[in-house]
Amino acid sequence: MDLKRPPSAEHLGPFQLVLLVLSLLVLVGLAADTFLALPPEIARVLHVVDTVVCGIFFVDFVIRFRAAPSKAQFMRWGWVDLLASIPVIESLRWGRAVRVLRVLRLLRGLRSVQRILALLFAHRTRGGVASVGLVSFLVITFSSVGILLCERSPASNIRSAEDAIWWSITTITTVGYGDKYPVTTAGRVVAAAVMVIGVGLFGTLSGLIASLFLGDTENKIEQEENEILVELRALRAEVAELRAAQAKPPAGPPGS
């Protein structure tokens, strides 16, 4: 193993690609919150997103730390992931600076677009589930921010960050309780886009789950067929040995 090479570059998979996108998302949110004068409720949405993503980072760190053969070698780069999981807390604000290093470290494992596609197609089911989860999270994030930007009418009932996130979740899942709804034209356009995307996402998820079960059945059938082929080859070898033994002329008496 190359000790100079970060572990994430060696064990890059679909979930690591999701973490890379989430890392970029929280960096963009942090930059927007720092350099732009955002409305308070939009800033709260970004803080909620940042906290959720930090929780995902921490869970990933714990899982990989427990699975690491050498804890000391893992912590050579693992400390970056640990500090990157610090949420938006003013007393720990310095810890978020290492997120840039985390992104650069993850990018080292992605040599090209072909590398990304190879990872996704090599693990189609896991890559598909990871993609659906990532797109759902991104849609909820951007639709929450978008609906707060659009719904500034006095008649709007989506006013807080909690209202926006709740509305986004109920809309993308096509539940639509009706307690929160857009009243402006721009807000309804956002709602229509989220509903269409939600139908596509859950249709894709249903297909992935079906293919997962079908894939297990097909794998079992293929395994049984391989076992039968191995047994047939062994029988052929035994039959060939018996024929060879029968065709061999008997040995003459000693001294003849």
Image (spheres, grey):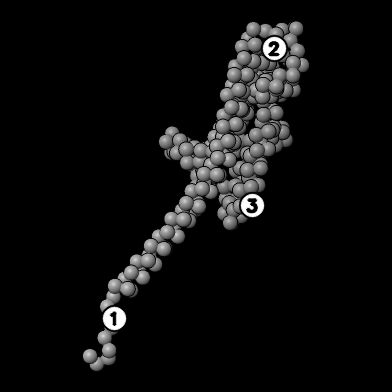
* Nearer the observer, 256 or 109: 256
* Residue 147 shows in this picture: yes
- Indicate which disc, 1 or 3, sits on the residue closer to the N terminus: 3
- Indicate which disc, 3 or 2, sits on the residue closer to the N terminus: 3
10 Å crowding of disc 1: few (<14), some (14-19), many (20+): few
Three-letter amino acid code of the residue under disc 2 = Pro
Residue in the picture at 68% in, 16% down: 148
Mark carried by residue 66: 3
SS assignment at label 2: loop
Q: Quadrant of residue 240?
A: bottom left
Disc 2 designates what residue?
182
- Indicate which disc, 2 or 1, sits on the residue closer to the N terminus: 2
Q: Position of residue 29 (x, y in %)?
A: 62, 26
Three-letter amino acid code of the residue under disc 1 = Pro
Residue in the picture at 61% in, 23% down: 198
SS assignment at label 1: loop
Give the residue furthest to the left: 256
Disc 1 designates what residue?
250
Q: Position of residue 113 (x, y in %)?
A: 43, 34
10 Å crowding of disc 2: few (<14), some (14-19), many (20+): many
